[in-house]
Amino acid sequence: MTLTTTLTDLANPTRFLSLTARVLPWLTAATAILLAIGLYQSAMAPDDYQQGATVKIMFIHVPNAWLAMFVWGVMSVAALGTLVWRHPLADVAAKAAAPIGAAFTFLALVTGSLWGRPMWGTYWEWDARLTSVLILFLMYLGLMALWRAVEDPSRAARAAAVLTLVGALNLPIIKFSVDWWNTLHQPASVFRMGGPTLDRAFLIPLLVMAVAFSLLFVTLHLAAMRNEILRRRVRSLQMMQASRKAA
Amino acid sequence: MQLSGRGVRCVRGGREVLSGLDFTVSSGEALAVTGANGSGKTSLLRTIAGHVAVTGGSIGLEGGEPELTLAEQAHYLGHRDAMKPALSVLENLLFWRDFLGGEISDAGQCLKLVGIEHAKNLPAAYLSAGQRRRLSIARLLTVRRPIWLLDEPTSALDSDGQTLFVGVTRDHLARGGIVVAATHAPLGIEAKQLRIGGAR
Amino acid sequence: MTALAALIKRDVQIALRVGGGALIGVLFFLTVVVLMPFAIGPDLALLTRLGPAILWLGALLASLLTLDRLFMADHDDGSLDLIAMSRTPLELSCAAKALAHWLAAGVPLIVATPVLGLLLNLDAGSTLAVALTLLVGTPALTFTGIIGAALAVTLHRGGLLLAVLVLPLSIPVLIFGVAASEAAISGPVSFGTPFSILAALSLISFVVGPFAAAASLRQGLD
């Protein structure tokens, strides 16, 4: 009961603006504190016996890579919201998430190639994992281009929603194909993540950083949604002004 | 200044749209071209503007600037308004002012005159069809050219807009300009009549 | 001069605003280059060797496919009629539009080249060589491409027809662009020879392109 009322309340952009105005300062503070703790712990973490200090890139890289995929998930839910439930804030959420998701994906790519540099001797290797992220990045950019290509946001919203869902269905297939393509050409990957065998000294800072980056996403996303709502209000005000009779 | 056509013939897409048309308009005169749909009114205007080549006969201007061609001394106002939706109203107007060149008047003042000054910094995409037409009229006022070729100039205009149009056209004629307008509705100004395509 | 500057400014503004296509060209370039390794295989040594060719092909396709609506958009909204009635010769207007298109769509391709060079494992020197040849060669692509863009107005058709018309015209640019890049990277030909020819091709296209485009547009106006 309370959940449905909250959802209907949030559906009203004005309520959303006033609610987020109250929440955002706290979220920003929490994000800053957690990021500070996470960065401190990451800096204090011991060097890896094989990788040395470069292992610390992991604390930035892994949360970014995780969020790169998570944001597409958020956009897919928002796309369903646009197409199925016609939730008035759904396309705002989807549009606001795309550039943030693209930024996380870009950071995952940059940190990934910096991390790979000492191991591969090049900044870029067509490693299956990195290549999949690169394709994800391209899909984010395509989605942003779609939003930019159409001036009327409500018309762009449905097209973007369809593309987002198709992308969500396609991502596992792309991932599988890239893995297959990669193993076909080169034997085992040079570069393997520790996985579950990760030491506690690494695991705790990594988890803190993951939570901090997730909070960062929520903060940025809410702020971007506010901007988008305001931008649309400016747009409709401008249209009202244009149709006003000359005095 | 006198704009005249002698036996103007024009063939477009294998079809003769104008056959042996004669007309004369002098400074301070308006010519209202009437005729049924498809009778070649637009073709005549586009022929005078130089967009369509004459197949026979000739169109000439006497007493104009000798250095310039007929098209360079004429304004063409067609169905398509040549305004970019992504640019603001003022940006659109300033572009045509700078690009068309020649004698110009204050763009902001012209927007005020046609009644869309309140929208000058908004994207042209937000304008209604009537407002876009007013913006086109502002272009005619901002860049001074003696000959106005107008294709259905009052379509999409409300009654205020039509009054405005009659006003600016009268001013233009009083300054010694020439107006050739293809129209269905009466223009509201004294004009010589040219009826084309009636015989067919 | 004000007239041409105004035209260039307008076209660049439209390309960069909402609905404009300036950055889509770069995205297309990026996508084409990323697709190549999937066809060739992730063998870095091979990709390095093919790098200049891949970059040039990508830039060629990206700069020609975005030309599609250069004149068509102006024709559809009536701007082309007024451009033809200006005191500026149509040839100069065509050249200005081509320059604006190169600034908005061609320069970003050159800026993106170093990033793509990284993906293809080109070293700094090779990337610089490719970027330099693109800087000199892409204007030739744009200025020959406008002939096709003008024909598209005459024929009332764009898209793939344009590509079929224009791509053969761009073969010399491709040959000397890739040759110059490879000469700079591995030799044995000296860099200067193909590079000078590439520059000459650009200079020729500056003259031929606008005249041919204007001639074609005059036919297409009615």
Image (spheres, helix red, strand yellow):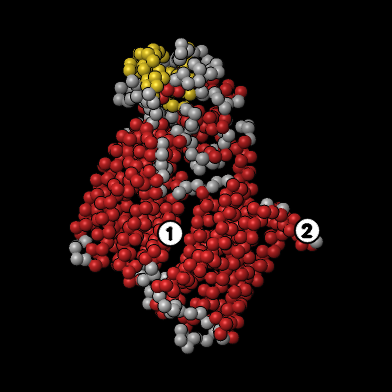
* Residue B168, numbered circle: none
Residue farthest bottom in this picture = A49
- Residue B182 lies, with reference to residue A160, above or below; the image says above
**Image quarter hosting the N terminus of chain C:** top left
Q: In the structure shown, which secondary structural element does the residue marked by tag 1 occupy? A: helix
Residue C165: x percent and y percent?
33, 44
Residue C122: x percent and y percent?
33, 68
Residue farthest right in this picture = A1
Nearer the observer, A137 or C108: A137
Pointer 1 residue? C31
Nearer the observer, B77 or C180: C180
Tell me if residue C1 can be seen: no
Q: In the structure shown, which secondary structural element does the residue marked by tag 2 occupy? A: helix
CA distance separating discs 1 and 2: 44 Å
Q: Quadrant of residue B59?
A: top left
Question: What amino acid is found at the position of numbered circle 2 in the picture?
Answer: Thr
Q: Residue at x 46, y 11 (%)?
A: B199
Q: Quadrant of residue A21?
A: bottom right
Report the chain holding disc 1.
C
Nearer the observer, C101 or B189: C101
Pointer 2 residue? A5
Same-chain check, marks 1 and 2: no
Q: Residue at x 25, y 51 (%)?
A: C172
Q: Residue at x 73, y 58 (%)?
A: A7
Report the chain holding disc 2.
A
From the viewer's perspective, is the residue at label 1 or at label 2 nearer? Answer: 1
Q: Quadrant of residue C188?
A: bottom left
Residue C15: x percent and y percent?
45, 47
Nearer the observer, A245 or A191: A191
